[in-house]
Image (cartoon, helix red, strand yellow):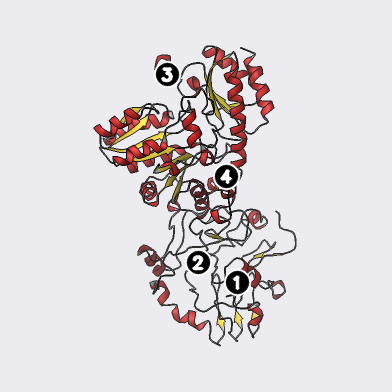
């Protein structure tokens, strides 16, 4: 939304069209007196919050950003930090001691003056005038129906400022924000679709703004106002991300959405799905340890397990996804730290009995990690069936628009923290702009997955009956070896169908090339349909006999259904089959 030529007034913050926000000598005629703030303050429960702009915050906004309110709300967004121990009895960081007198003085009758980029806190009943400088914001304690009117003395505001009265007990140094409380969405959101839209945002977030959408916080580091604040942070009395590699306010919103969908205590987002997988394996399997994985899986994951982990003395047992006996044997013969698998798997969509393998592994002290990328959090809740960790390539369904790379790890805080500690060393940080795309994508995730489930199911049935298709791999088909298991632990079977065409490598390639709607590409889960021939796309570097060891035949096709009209996709596939 472009800013009009006249000034726009927001509760608590100003949005001005004046391109020169840095002027401190603005003529008095340009002063803008904002309306009373008590309504907004009380409505959003911000009565005791203190807002302040970082130094030069307004000056750093580009002209384009100043004129655009759709993303960051022009001069509304303020970085906020909070402390988990703020409400603890006797809590008083060292950084606050020197300012205790100043906070108390806010309720006195003497005039209070605040400088640039500072916060003025005043008692509601204060009778003296309050003068504030440029770029200041003071929030009022809502103790009456009209807190501003209750102040008996005039309040003067300068350029881009808002001053109201506040409880003197408020801490002027520790910027507070309403972080999302423990998962409470179940009290008023009854579906995963609603949770995906509102989790991490509707009940509060770490960015103080009245914008509906979460702003993108593009920063590489977070500042401390003074050394005492830094010491408080180092001694764990104050919370801060400190550095961009350790956290970001936009990314946290995306993480909380995934946690809410998975029913997880914590989620960590990384730069890609492989980044998440490799960091998890290195963090949770000790040097010299042993893990169990399955034959059907993403090839790059298998390469990492077979070629990189052995350099750390880590060995692996590889079993069929349905080989419960093989799992029991591996657990008996080895000191297994982790069972790592996909469910459904790539590309044959095999399903693992998550509840059973979790019980077997836990009895032997091993952890269970399920890669649920092909399922999505809507179709399968791996943690609810006993898995310890669930990971996703958020590049796929969660992002859903073929425009972002990301990977997520969800589970208990203790386990996710172990991965996070290694992640802070290795890097692989998700860009906040990518986090914004994940947030955006998740708000339509349930709609997309519902369409993709439906299209894939109907097309799988049509393909299975087609004379030019030898075999179809899809958990929703009765012919699938784990169909009953899939029905037990999944509510939908996903948008990917793999099938074998009646022909050789070249015949199959002709079918793929005859398709007009899907793109030939190495991904899945997006709005656009995608098709690939695994023998060429993923295994072309191996000879045919080696590819066959992994079940990758030359006539295998993996089709990811997008959200296009079903009849259009059906007609396209049928006409392509007619060409061979």
Q: Residues within 10 Å of mark 1 (few under 14, many from 20)?
A: many
Residue 303 horizontal side relative to residue 169, left or right = left
- Snapshot quadrant of residue 300: top left
Which residue lies under the disc numbered 4? 442
Percent of width and height locating residue 185 = 54, 54
Which residue lies under the disc numbered 1? 134
* Residue depth check, mark 4 versus mark 3: number of the one nearer the observer: 4
How much space separates mark 4 and mark 1, taking CA atoms? Answer: 39 Å
Q: Residues within 10 Å of mark 4 (few under 14, many from 20)?
A: many
Q: Nearer the viewer, residue 480 or 562?
A: 480
Label located before the other in sequence (4 or 1): 1
Q: Residues within 10 Å of mark 3 (few under 14, many from 20)?
A: some
Which residue lies under the disc numbered 2? 176
Residue 547: assigned label: 3
SS at circle 3: helix
Label located before the other in sequence (1 or 2): 1
Q: Is residue 156 above or below residue 212?
A: below
Residue 12 horizontal side relative to residue 184, left or right = right
Q: Is residue 424 above or below residue 375?
A: below
How much space separates mark 1 and mark 3, taking CA atoms? Answer: 68 Å
Label located before the other in sequence (1 or 3): 1
Percent of width and height locating residue 122 = 56, 79
Label located before the other in sequence (4 or 3): 4
CB of mark 4 within 8 Å of CB of mark 1? no
Label located before the other in sequence (3 or 2): 2
CB of mark 3 within 8 Å of CB of mark 2? no
Q: For the C terminus, give its image quadrant.
A: top right
């Amino acid at each position: 939304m472009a800013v009009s030529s006249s000034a726009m007034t927001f509760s608590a913050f100003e949005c001005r069209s004046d391109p020169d926000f840095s002027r401190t000598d603005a003529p008095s005629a340009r002063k803008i007196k904002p309306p009373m703030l008590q309504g907004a303050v009380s409505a959003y429960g911000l009565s005791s919050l203190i807002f302040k702009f970082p130094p030069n915050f307004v000056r750093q906004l580009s002209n384009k950003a100043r004129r655009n309110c759709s993303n960051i709300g022009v001069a509304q967004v303020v970085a906020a930090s909070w402390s988990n121990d703020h409400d603890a009895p006797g809590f008083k960081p060292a950084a606050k001691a020197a300012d205790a007198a100043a906070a108390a003085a806010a309720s006195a009758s003497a005039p209070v003056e605040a400088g640039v980029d500072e916060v003025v806190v005043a008692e509601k009943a204060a009778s003296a005038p309050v003068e504030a400088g440029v770029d200041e914001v003071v929030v009022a304690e809502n103790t009456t129906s009209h807190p501003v009117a209750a102040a008996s003395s005039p309040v003067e505001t300068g350029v881009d400022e808002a001053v109201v009265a506040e409880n003197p007990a408020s801490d002027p140094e520790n910027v507070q924000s309403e972080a999302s409380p423990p998962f409470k969405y179940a009290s008023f959101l009854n579906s995963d679709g609603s949770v995906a839209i509102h989790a991490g945002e509707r009940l509060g977030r770490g960015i103080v703004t009245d914008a509906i959408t979460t702003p993108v916080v593009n920063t590489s580091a977070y500042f401390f106002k003074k050394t005492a604040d830094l010491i408080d942070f180092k001694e764990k009395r104050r919370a801060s991300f400190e550095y961009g590699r350790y956290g970001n306010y936009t990314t946290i919103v995306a993480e909380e959405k995934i946690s809410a969908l998975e029913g997880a205590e914590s989620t960590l987002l990384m730069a890609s799905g492989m980044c998440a997988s490799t960091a998890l394996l290195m963090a949770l399997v000790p040097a010299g340890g042993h893990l169990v994985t399955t034959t059907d899986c993403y090839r790059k994951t298998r390469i990492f397990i077979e070629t990189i982990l052995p350099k750390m003395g880590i060995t692996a047992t590889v079993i069929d996804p349905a080989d419960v006996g093989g799992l029991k044997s591996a657990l008996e013969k080895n000191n297994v730290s982790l069972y790592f698998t996909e469910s459904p798997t790539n590309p044959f969509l095999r399903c693992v009995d998550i509840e059973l393998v979790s019980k077997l592994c836990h009895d032997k002290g091993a952890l269970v990690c399920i890669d649920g990328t092909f399922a999505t959090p809507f179709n399968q809740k791996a943690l609810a069936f006993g898995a310890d960790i669930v990971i996703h390539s958020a590049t796929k369904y969660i992002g859903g628009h073929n425009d972002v790379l990301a990977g997520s790890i969800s589970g208990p805080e203790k386990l996710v923290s172990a991965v996070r500690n290694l992640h802070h060393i290795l890097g692989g940080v998700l860009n906040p702009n990518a986090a914004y795309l994940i947030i955006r994508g998740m708000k339509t995730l349930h709609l997309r997955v519902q369409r993709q489930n439906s299209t894939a199911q109907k097309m799988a049935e049509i393909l299975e009956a087609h004379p030019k298709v030898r075999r179809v791999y899809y958990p929703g088909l009765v012919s699938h070896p784990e169909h009953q298991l899939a029905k037990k632990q999944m509510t939908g079977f996903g948008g990917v169908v793999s099938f074998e065409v009646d022909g050789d490598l070249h015949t199959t390639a002709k079918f793929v090339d005859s398709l007009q709607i899907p793109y030939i590409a190495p991904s899945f889960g997006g709005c656009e349909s995608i098709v690939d021939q695994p023998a060429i796309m993923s295994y072309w570097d191996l000879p045919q006999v080696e590819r066959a060891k992994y079940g990758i035949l030359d006539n295998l096709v993996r089709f990811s259904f997008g959200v296009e009209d079903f009849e259009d996709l059906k007609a396209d596939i049928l006409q392509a089959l007619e060409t061979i």
